[in-house]
Image (cartoon, coloured by chain):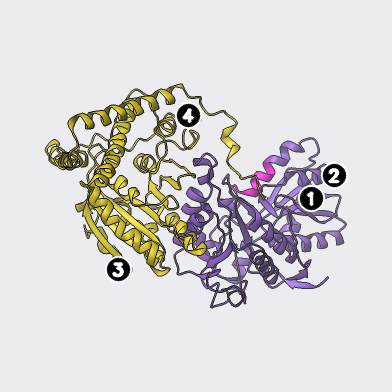
Amino acid sequence: MQDERTELLKLYRQMLLIRRFEEASAKAYSQGKIGGFLHLYIGQEACAVGTLAALEPRDYVVTTYRDHAQALARGTSARACMAELYGKVTGCSKGLGGSMHFFDADNHMLGGHGIVGGHCPIAAGAALASKYRGDGAVTVCFFGEGSATIGAFHEALALSALWNLPIVFICENNEYSMGTPLSRSLSVHDVSQKGPAFGMERDRFGASDVNEVRARMQVAIDRARNESKPTLIEVALYRYRGHSMSDPGKYRTADEIEERKKTDCLLVAEGKLGALGVTEAELLAIAESVDAEVEDAVQFAEASAEPDESLIEAFTYAPGV
Amino acid sequence: MRELRYREALREAMTEEMVRDERVFIMGEEVGHYQGAYKVTEGMLAQFGEKRVMDTPIAEEGFAGIAIGAAMVGLRPIVEFMTWNFSAVAFDQILSNATKLRQMSGGQFTVPIVFRGPNGAARQTAAQHSHAMETFYAQIPGLKVVVPSTAADAKGLMASAIRDDNPVLVLEDERLYGIKGEVPEGEHLVPIGVAAVRRAGTQCTIATWGKMVPVSLEAAELLAAEGVQCEVIDLRSLRPLDHGTVATSVRKTGRLVIVHEAWPYGGPGAELSDRVQRDCFDSLRAPIVRCTGRDASMPYNKKLEELTIPGSATVTQAVRAVMAY
């Protein structure tokens, strides 16, 4: 009971940190302090947090351009993440990557990738390396259901299944690939059905309960680690914001969004925490510490230096031969 | 010195590097059990086993990306494209991942990887199987692109490519696989980015690469009989591009003909021309001329194919025009 309480409080705090971090980043974006694209994960937090809670430090994480949550949940500091959004040299990619390209070698966070589906083979490659070396690491690869129509995704699945790679493919199905609903993008709405086509195990569940996500992911991660077999998992979730900050989301009704917010992962976690005896005061204290952490990250980003011009070509080539 | 065929020299480099470094492995279509579509990897499966000589299904984007991911976390893959034509299917992996991960991660990740295979026209393989792909790849910052034209360079450039911490493209040539040449035994490294003077001459510089090197040497021989002494430079590497060696030669000859198989629109030949005209403006006695493949898709017909790619006759014609300017 005590363990369960402590663990859920930890995950709740991570989810809340991601939510507040992204709300602050949306504000900074509207103030013109963050440029380019900004894709928010708000509403989907339990998926990244629940999945990464089931990983070990040696494991690898690969994801899409909607990558803030994965980096934060993997342990990249809010400061380094916010500074990256601001394009500052103190950012997790030295200000050269931006919102879509968060990397953190120390935490085995292999990015933040901008070409839909193009990162799925990269993830399979990390898994291949683990199998080659016998290091026991598992790779998890996140992508949206919008990736399920592109070739790189299918090739990554085909080869991972053929070679029995230790990987978990996680389809974050938020029902819209940018502005196009499932009904107009996929002939088969159940993306997990593509797993059996490659002889791959599958699972499919919702992401409102972070504990449920963690438990279901654990099964697939164990299968990868212990049997060196891939799994395709589809997680049903919902993003409250548009595809990116430039998307007003006119293809959805306010009623639809309000309906989905009733099963918000933070609400569900708060209910469970209440049942475990966590008080309002304790939750408030967590919220205050999260707000302080985000505010500190914003201040840090604001105060940090821009990357020097010398960094334009500095990383084009590795020096070693 | 002992002689090897070009394909054997490539194999010797890969084999020696795989013995030297456990992290090096090769993957590609038919590289293992079939012994290589062009027999470059013949015998390697028996020596290294399936873990390090991996047959792949026909999924260039998939296995190119997998190799990039493996390189990102510390392995050193060699990826064989059965021909470079098929690399177009994997182009996004090379363009958006192999060459971008280091930059986008602020230097946290590197991609030590070799992509290799035969490039350009073979014999009557028609429009979809005859691309000289260097035109596309030499453009991309973050890549190195080498084109060996001799058996010795096939070994030395391949070994250097494998040891390099960056993505290196080795553009081989089906028409060169069978040629023989002296190849040093044991460790033999040819530095990437250094051109070689293949024939000394005083009146006109010919700069070229790949299978246009023997064509240009043949042309130089014909021209010598006419009393025109050409200096033939094999660039060997298109990125980095050793324009300095060419410029030194042009300061002596005052004339430059650039010979390549690829299309005339842009590419490394145009890049070289641009650099040399600035470096050697005062030395040039004639405009720089490019003798290139024709601006068309490759025809199947044997006679038309020969007319589409530069031959010694077209090269001599270009040199004569420059000499007469």
Q: Is residue B272 magenta?
A: yes
* Dot in front, 3 or 2: 3
In the rendered structure, are the residues bearing label 3 and label 4 in contact, judged by CB atoms less than 8 Å apart? no
- The segment highlighted magenta reads B261-274
Q: Chain of mark 3?
A: A
Viewer can see residue A149: yes
| Pointer 3 residue | A197
> Which chain is tinted yellow?
A
Q: Quadrant of the N terminus of chain B?
A: bottom right
Q: Earlier in the sequence, mark 3 or mark 4?
A: 4
Q: Amino acid at mark 4?
A: Lys
Left or right: residue A153 compared with residue A3: right
Q: Amino acid at mark 3?
A: Ala
Circle 1: element type: strand
Mark number, residue A88: 4
In the rendered structure, are the residues bearing label 2 and label 4 in contact, judged by CB atoms less than 8 Å apart? no
Circle 3: element type: helix
Please rate how many residues cluster around mark 2, counting C-alpha atoms within 10 Å: few if below 14, some from 14 to 19, many from 20: some
Please rate how many residues cluster around mark 4, counting C-alpha atoms within 10 Å: few if below 14, some from 14 to 19, many from 20: many
Cα gap from disc 2 to disc 4, whole angstroms: 50 Å
Task: Pinpoint residue B241: horizontal percent, then vertical percent.
Answer: 68, 47
In the rendered structure, are the residues bearing label 2 and label 1 in contact, judged by CB atoms less than 8 Å apart? yes
| Pointer 2 residue | B252
Colour assigned to chain B in the rendering is purple
Left or right: residue B188 compared with residue B294: right
* Dot in front, 3 or 1: 3
Q: Are discs 2 and 4 located on one and the same chain?
A: no
* Dot in front, 3 or 4: 4
